[in-house]
Image (cartoon, rainbow, N blue to C red):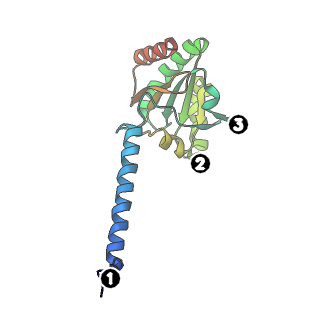
Amino acid sequence: MGDEQAPAPPPSRGVQLSNTVIIAGLFAIAAALAVQEFIGGDGLEPGHPAPPLTMTRLDGSTATLSALEGQVVLLNFWATWCPPCNDEMPELVAIARAYEGKGVVFVAANQEDADDARATVGPWLSRHPEVRPYVVLTDPEASAAFLVQALPTTFVINAKGEVVQIARGQVAGWRVKKWLDDALASP
C-alpha cells in the first residue's frame, strides 16, 4: 500500500443531527437579536418607521396609515372596556380638535375583536359622540405590528412616518401637546 489514506467515513446520523441543531440554534439566536434590535426590548421604539396599518372606518371603508404621511399622526390604541382608555379619551379628542388645523390627524384605533367591536363600539359612541370622527376598527395584527402590550397605548408619528413618541398606559394631555408641538416643529 502506498502513502494514500483511506477516505474518512461519512459522519454518523447523530453527528449530522447535532450539526443541524447547532446551525438552527445559531439562526434562532441571530433572529432573536435582530428582533431585539428592532423593538428595543419593550416594544416598538421611537426612531423606527411606523409599521403599515390598514384601518376600517365605521362606514366600512378602509384607510391606511401610509395615506396620512406628510401629517403628524396621534395614534391611540384603545378599547371600550378599558377604564384608562375611557378616562383619557375626552382629553385626546380635545387635543385632536385643537391641533387639526396644524396638520395633526387623530386616529382612535379600537382593539376589540371584530364581532365584539360591532356590538360594543356603536353603543359606546352613542354615549361619546365626540369621538366618532376619530374611531377606526383594527384587527389583532395591528396591535401586534405596533407591539402594543397594554391599553391604552399612544403613538406620535411624524410627517415622515417615523414613530417619535410612545406612551404605554394613560398619558397626560400636556405631554401629548408637547410631543405634537415637537413633531410639528421638526423637519
Label 3, label 2: how far apart the Cα atoms are: 17 Å
Amino acid type at image mark 2: Asp
- Location of residue 32 with respect to 61 vertically, above or below: below
Amino acid type at image mark 1: Ala
- Comes first in the chain, label 3 or label 1: 1
Give the residue at mark 2: 115
Q: What SS does tag 2 mark?
A: helix
- Location of residue 25 with respect to 162 vertically, above or below: below
Amino acid type at image mark 3: Ser
In this rendering, which labeled residue sits more in front, label 3 or label 1?
1
Give the residue at mark 3: 61
Q: Residue at x 50, y 11 (%)?
A: 185
- Comes first in the chain, label 3 or label 2: 3
The label on residue 6 is 1
**Dots 3 and 1: beta carbons under 8 Å?**
no
Q: Nearer the viewer, residue 168 or 134?
A: 168
Q: What SS does tag 1 mark?
A: loop
Q: Is residue 69 left or right of residue 80?
A: right
**Callout 1 environment at 10 Å: few (<14), some (14 to 19), or many (20+)?**
few
Residue 148 image position (x, y, % from top left)? 44, 39
The label on residue 90 is none
Residue 150 visible in image:
no
Quarter of the image containing the N terminus? Answer: bottom left
**Callout 2 environment at 10 Å: few (<14), some (14 to 19), or many (20+)?**
few
Q: Nearer the viewer, residue 39 or 177?
A: 39
Q: Residue at x 44, y 32 (%)?
A: 153
Q: What SS does tag 3 mark?
A: loop
Q: Nearer the viewer, residue 102 or 59?
A: 102
